[in-house]
């Protein structure tokens, strides 16, 4: 029996191959981008699947098509995010001006795929896709502007940017099954996105290179905490972020301060607080054991 990732992967192949309005050059690029995405897995599509499966007696096979549509949207956002960050690790960074056209095509394809599905409540699903996609774009704009420099504003930003996409994936599955959505699933769906973003922020600081948020003068929870410490190390980081001041950062001193000065522990604490909130809500949602185990895995 094929697992969910395999079924979503097959549905993606069909969506791409059957898109008659996509010229060959764009289709070829999209296939190569999808191949790179397949290595990462289809976490968002699986969120949709489990929240659909929880509320139906008989599975409509089109759920894999909808899960694939969500993954197209997510991939388009990943591409745009990487191009904005000038991240050169992925194939789409080789020709950014062409890759942007592929990302734009995927945005349209994702909405159309849901609209063309056989679900009774597909119009609600499309509305959710569009509403939460807009919300995520608003968060991405704040992230690129790099203006969220305190705990509250930063958490609000990642709630919009990342939490919107995980909540959207959960809610589309629920909407297709029930014709309505619940605040509980939206809430813990957002928490999952926030948790994942904080994990990424912590991981960014573990390597001293081009993806390090501190070296790139980006703000994240550990960096916000570090800057608030009022000591010589925090002063050097603040000076480094001030473009008018040339500052040398000692890698070992900074890494030691992040680890032993409380910044990483602080970020982990905030992450775990959101995990506890999500787990409490999840207890009362009728998702089967395998689905709940998957959700809990995303919160670790």
Image: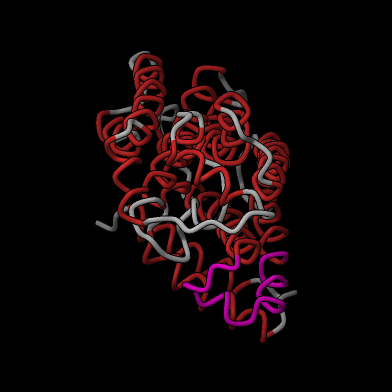
Q: Residue at x 67, y 66 (%)?
A: 103
Residue 202 percent coordinates (x, y) = 38, 44
Which quarter of the figure has residue 39?
A: bottom left
Q: Residue at x 70, y 70 (%)?
A: 100
User: Viewer-proximal residue, 227 or 53?
Assistant: 227
User: Viewer-proximal residue, 117 or 81?
Assistant: 81
Q: How is the image coloured?
A: secondary structure
User: Viewer-proximal residue, 226 or 222?
Assistant: 226
> What segment carries the magenta color?
86-104
Is residue 218 found left or right of 232 in the rendered image?
Answer: right
Residue 96 magenta-highlighted: yes
Residue 135 percent coordinates (x, y) = 70, 37
Residue 137 percent coordinates (x, y) = 70, 45
Is residue 221 found left or right of 217 in the rendered image?
Answer: left
Residue 126 percent coordinates (x, y) = 69, 42
What is the tally of numbered marks visible in this picture? 0
Q: Is residue 200 above or below residue 53?
A: below
Is residue 229 found left or right of 129 in the rendered image?
Answer: left
Any part of residue 52 in sight: no
Q: Quadrant of the N terminus?
A: bottom left
Q: Quadrant of the C terminus?
A: top left
Q: Is residue 261 above or below residue 3?
A: above
Residue most toward the bottom?
25
Q: Residue at x 34, y 36 (%)?
A: 264
Any part of residue 5 in sight: yes
Q: Is residue 166 above or below residue 186?
A: below
Residue 191 magenta-highlighted: no
Q: Residue at x 42, y 47 (%)?
A: 200
Q: What's the magenta bit mostly, secondary-structure-wise?
A: helix
Which quarter of the figure has residue 101?
A: bottom right
């Amino acid at each position: 029996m094929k697992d969910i990732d395999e079924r979503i992967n097959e549905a993606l192949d069909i969506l791409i191959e059957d898109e008659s309005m996509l010229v060959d050059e764009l289709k070829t690029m999209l296939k190569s981008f999808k191949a790179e995405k397949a290595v990462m897995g289809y976490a968002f599509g699986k969120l949709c699947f489990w929240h659909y499966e929880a509320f139906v007696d008989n599975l409509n096979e089109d759920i894999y098509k909808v899960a694939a549509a969500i993954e197209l949207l997510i991939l388009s956002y990943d591409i745009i995010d990487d191009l904005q960050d000038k991240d050169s690790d992925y194939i789409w960074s080789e020709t950014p001006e062409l890759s942007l056209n592929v990302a734009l095509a995927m945005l349209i394809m994702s909405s159309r795929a849901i609209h063309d599905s056989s679900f009774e409540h597909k119009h609600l699903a499309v509305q959710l896709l569009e509403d939460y996609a807009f919300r995520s774009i608003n968060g991405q704009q704040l992230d690129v502007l790099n203006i969220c420099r305190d705990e509250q504003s930063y958490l609000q930003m990642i709630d919009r940017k990342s939490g919107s996409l995980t909540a959207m994936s959960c809610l589309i599955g629920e909407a297709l099954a029930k014709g309505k959505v619940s605040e509980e699933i939206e809430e813990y769906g957002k928490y999952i996105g926030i948790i994942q973003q904080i994990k990424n922020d912590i991981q960014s600081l573990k390597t001293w290179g081009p993806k390090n948020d501190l070296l790139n003068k980006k703000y994240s929870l550990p960096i916000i905490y570090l800057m608030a410490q009022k000591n010589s190390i925090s002063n050097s980081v603040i000076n480094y972020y001030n473009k008018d001041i040339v500052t040398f950062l000692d890698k070992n001193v900074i890494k030691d301060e992040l680890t032993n000065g409380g910044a990483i522990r602080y970020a982990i604490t905030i992450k775990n607080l959101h995990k506890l909130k999500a787990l409490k809500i999840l207890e009362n949602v009728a998702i089967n054991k395998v689905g709940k185990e998957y959700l809990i895995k995303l919160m670790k």
